[in-house]
Amino acid sequence: MLDEFCKVTGYHRKYALRMLNGPPPEKRPRKRRPRRPTYGAKVVLILAGIWEAAGYPWSVRLRALIPPWLPWVRKHFPMSAGVESQLLKISARQIDRRLREHKKKAGRRLYGRTKPGSLLKHHVPIKTDRWDVKRPGYTEIDLVSHSGNCATGEFAHTLNLVDIHTTWTESLAVLGKAQVRVQQGLDEIRKELPFELMGIDSDNGSEFINHHLVKYCEEGEIQFTRGRPYKKDDNAHIEQKNWTHVRKLMGWVRYDTETAVMAMNRLYRGDVRLLQNLFLPSVKLVRKERVGSRIKRHYGAAKTPFARVLECKEVRPMVVARLTALQEQLDPFALSRSVNVQLDRIHALANHVRSPSPQVKITPAVPCG
């Protein structure tokens, strides 16, 4: 074989041996041809505009709200049929990639200032098991303080309520956290719910664990439970809404006037309530699966809270009919702009002397319309 090799190549025998026993020749790596971007700049700009108008939701929620928002997207963002087709077929993973730079601007922490109460604790049972309800009306409630850097004196609080089955969320501002005001605020929210209030679950703050609220729940046949002290995971649903429905809007500044509370309630009971519940989808955790040392979470399809309300039998027909008519008439982009205008007015009413130093304002990358 060596003789044949030398005869064909004309190499000397010793050179042929060194060549055949040496290292194999290096292979030149093939250059990978870069993949052309599937989604153009126009698609990304429209996507960023929708993301901003919707309040910067998670990519799965953003993907779910694009089809129902499409009639209004066409009005605010002129686009071709090809761009519209790409917008409808883009995946949540691609949305994360395209909006990566915008998401680097987020990052804050939530701090509370409510203290645990010691009254009537034995009358309010502790609930620590997982929610397993098949109908609307069972809720978690919490109070979010707007004290700024100083917790002395009287300042505004936001009473926040979320329904476990539908994720329907209501908010209302009160000046101070007097027990009577919290009970009256809950009664006002209860009257406007699209379903009957069946139960509330709170933390151990004295604004909830008191004679006023216990008596109110007993008279209204409302189940009243509480979480364990210093265990925020017991009220995980409302803790999440404290960020998405309160802190993202009001920030950490101090509000301590009746004028500010009235302006907050005009926003809470008006445009924010309609935008969050009628137009913005949310996802619900279906189950958890342990894979080795990790836990894999499985979520259901993204739906708006109102869509889940419509799937229930236990609703108030008149309230649902009124909300259905509003959903057909309202423009989510116009609602978003109205929310931003009202927020600017509310922020001007803050007590900036007792508030944290102002943060750098993020300029929107794309106008809403």
Image (cartoon, helix red, strand yellow):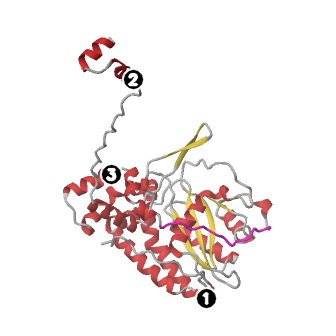
Q: Amino acid at mark 1?
A: Val
Q: CA distance from mark 2 to mark 1?
A: 84 Å
The quarter in which the C terminus is drawn is bottom left
Mark 3 vs mark 2, foreground winner is 2
Q: Dot 1, how many residues are within 10 Å of its Cα: few (below 14), some (14-19), or many (20+)?
A: few
In magenta stretch: residue 106 = yes
Secondary structure type for disc 2: helix
Secondary structure type for disc 3: loop
Q: Amino acid at mark 3?
A: Ile
Q: Residue at coordinates 26% horizontally, 62% vertically from top-left? A: 42
Q: Tell me if I can see residue 276 in this picture.
A: yes
Residue assigned mark 1 = 353
Residue assigned mark 2 = 18
Q: Amino acid at mark 2?
A: Arg
| Residue 190 screen position, x and y as percent | 56, 67
| Residue 160 screen position, x and y as percent | 58, 68
